[in-house]
Image (cartoon, coloured by chain):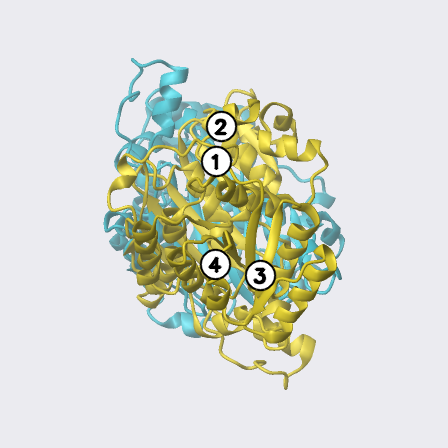
Chain colours: A yellow, B cyan
Amino acid sequence: MKERVKIAVIGCGSRGLFLLRMILEHMPDIDVIAVCDLYEDRTECAKNFVIQMRGITPAASCDYRDILSIDELDAVITPSAWEAHVEICIAAMEAGKYVGSEVGGAYSIDQCWQLVHTFEKTGVPCMMLENCCYGREELTILNMIKKGLFGEIVHCEGGYRHDLRDEVALGNENRHYRLRNYLSRNGELYPTHELGPIAKYLNINRGNRMLTLTSMASKSVGINDWIKRNRGEDFENANAKFALGDVVTTMIKCANGETITLTHDTSLPRPYSRGNLVQGTRGIWCEDTRGILLDGTDSNPSYAHRYRSLEEYMPDHEHPLWRDYQAVGGHGGIDYLVLSAFFDSVKRGSRVPIDVYDMASWMSITALSENSIAMGSSPVAIPDFTNGRWCSREPYMRSKYCLEEVCFDCFES
Amino acid sequence: MKERVKIAVIGCGSRGLFLLRMILEHMPDIDVIAVCDLYEDRTECAKNFVIQMRGITPAASCDYRDILSIDELDAVITPSAWEAHVEICIAAMEAGKYVGSEVGGAYSIDQCWQLVHTFEKTGVPCMMLENCCYGREELTILNMIKKGLFGEIVHCEGGYRHDLRDEVALGNENRHYRLRNYLSRNGELYPTHELGPIAKYLNINRGNRMLTLTSMASKSVGINDWIKRNRGEDFENANAKFALGDVVTTMIKCANGETITLTHDTSLPRPYSRGNLVQGTRGIWCEDTRGILLDGTDSNPSYAHRYRSLEEYMPDHEHPLWRDYQAVGGHGGIDYLVLSAFFDSVKRGSRVPIDVYDMASWMSITALSENSIAMGSSPVAIPDFTNGRWCSREPYMRSKYCLEEVCFDCFES
């Protein structure tokens, strides 16, 4: 097992710099030996940041291929634009480097298959860095589900419900990928913050799989309205036709009969929410109420059932990863934890807790949702990226970061 | 304008008796001159209740045709089984009696057309008694929407999310229609509590209409699980195959581009919720948080947006119907208000605020949802029951009970 990991950060926009800072400040065993961004100013800025914080000068390039050719490099992470994730992941696997991909959706199904094929050919792990899988609430619910407290899980909901009107509207100023995607694409563009945790609750790709989906998009008026009121009628895109519906809803059916509803909702005013809801035969969790109701804990008539606060369940059911993280006064939250999970795999040379099959199936929802909307909300089939192995793939139970079950042994050692 | 209304109550199960009691206790200008139920014991019980409360003996029969032939009868209400609503409404219109129908979904699209055709032939108004249209929160939101506070409405959600496992499981004991429907049908069986108010927000059938829907159903395991744990493996239907998925989700697209998501969720443990969510370009209302956020009232960065309590908006925006109702210490709530709306129309010989086109289009969602699910969540078209008149139908603005706008004039007089 390695004691230190040498990494490159590919993509040094605001997200990349955020992750870079966290690594430099809170992960002393991770050496950032290279930085890369398409834009020279960003690359330069990231390089100077590493020098300033660690006193060493990283390799720096605007071409990620230069970076991947560095022999001593162990792993890369890709906080790049959505469009670049898959390309970089494939190149990294081919170069023999562990790769942790920032989240986003796929542009085509072929792209997802390419990820899978490259992994199967090279054997190099590729992990989707879905930080919400390591959310405190999500992990606690995972723990409670795996203990059976919710009974048989029947239905889950989630969403990316985040007022991003300014980020989108000012996308050219900020060189942000959302603007061009919103102008041109209509679909569930960003499914994984909610779908990732739900997929783990439902054992997707390990005994279950997603079979089919249908998507529907509302009209698109939110961004135009924001621009006109906040920047004026003459600001760029004030009267542009945005392809993306303000609210896109997607329904997914699973092989074991569960349904999942996803909502992409980023162009209208609202408080942030991942809209999580988990319903089983014995209980329910509803994020918006921060509440849980377990069958039999409430003797009122059904009309008067009440949620109890999730906090009441924390002492008994909080996931040990968060318990330990908080005990040492941790910094960085879900981003720290998901990167720790990735670097832990790199150090051990092991598989990763969110693997290429997870990544391909979660990302595929975006392209499939675009297809469904384009065809008037027709149902479309979700490919089986495991080619049948989902029927018998076992839970991955090798580390304290695993997400199929809670590996209590890993915490006792 | 009539000062008193003579009515019959057709359907005297628990819902019928509940409404009967409210009328007898709180509506002194309404004379219940006839009662009817398929079951003789229920008819007898209702008759005795009227005698006891009002000292007069109503006509009583197990055949609603006997009741409809009573000349002096002005109107009937139908708190009967779901299956009987449309048949009774049609017979009542043909007999020249105003009819107020309890809520439920349609079994076929033809049934909806029959309602419309009978109204168009007879000119006798038929009103769906959708009490939730007169909910305090729903009316306040209607008022705020019509004032423009939410901007252009883009997306609405709602649900009938009510733990009814005992009612369904004990359906034979209680002679309740849900059991047989749940055993045989898979669809959005009960859409109107949420769809009714939403349809009024969106001007459905008056400048807008519902175009298409697609539905998806989860597996069905909740009722079986409840029966086995609460009544044992040998209880009836413990191992029956219920057709109805525990959670049924339906997405609807409207002519003006809005989307509506409905959820039928009655077979799993949960607190009651109508799951209301309204999103516009300038604001949002979320029932589960009892919160509202209006654009510009919160200067935090978008990530930190917070709901304000709906109660904060009540002093300025509460609907005058509720303001007046509470000022006199009203009883019966939404049921009192919806019946008052109906009886008000009967007294004035006017149109009704939830008319046969509303009723047909709202009820049709059930049959269409069954079709969509049967065809693997295919999109299905929603008929235009107005035959094109939706394009130009004006808001109905004649009484304080109207739901298209708030008729402030009606309150000032």
Of residue A87 and residue B359, the one placed in the foreground of this image is A87
| Discs 3/2, front | 3
Tell me which label, 3 or 4, sits earlier in the chain.
Answer: 3
Q: Tell me, yes or no, whether dots 4 and 1 are on the same chain.
A: yes
Tell me which label, 3 or 2, sits earlier in the chain.
Answer: 3
Numbered label attached to residue A407: 2
Near mark 3 (Cα within 10 A), the count class, few <14, some 14-19 or many ≥20, is many
- The three-letter amino acid code for the residue at tag 2 is Cys
Q: Is residue B106 above or below residue B1?
A: above
Of residue B39 and residue B291, the one placed in the foreground of this image is B291
- The three-letter amino acid code for the residue at tag 1 is Cys
Q: Tell me, yes or no, whether dots 3 and 4 are on the same chain.
A: yes
* SS type, badge 1: loop
- Residue B406 visible in rendering: no
| Discs 3/4, front | 3
Tell me which label, 1 or 3, sits earlier in the chain.
Answer: 3
Disc 1 marks which residue?
Answer: A402
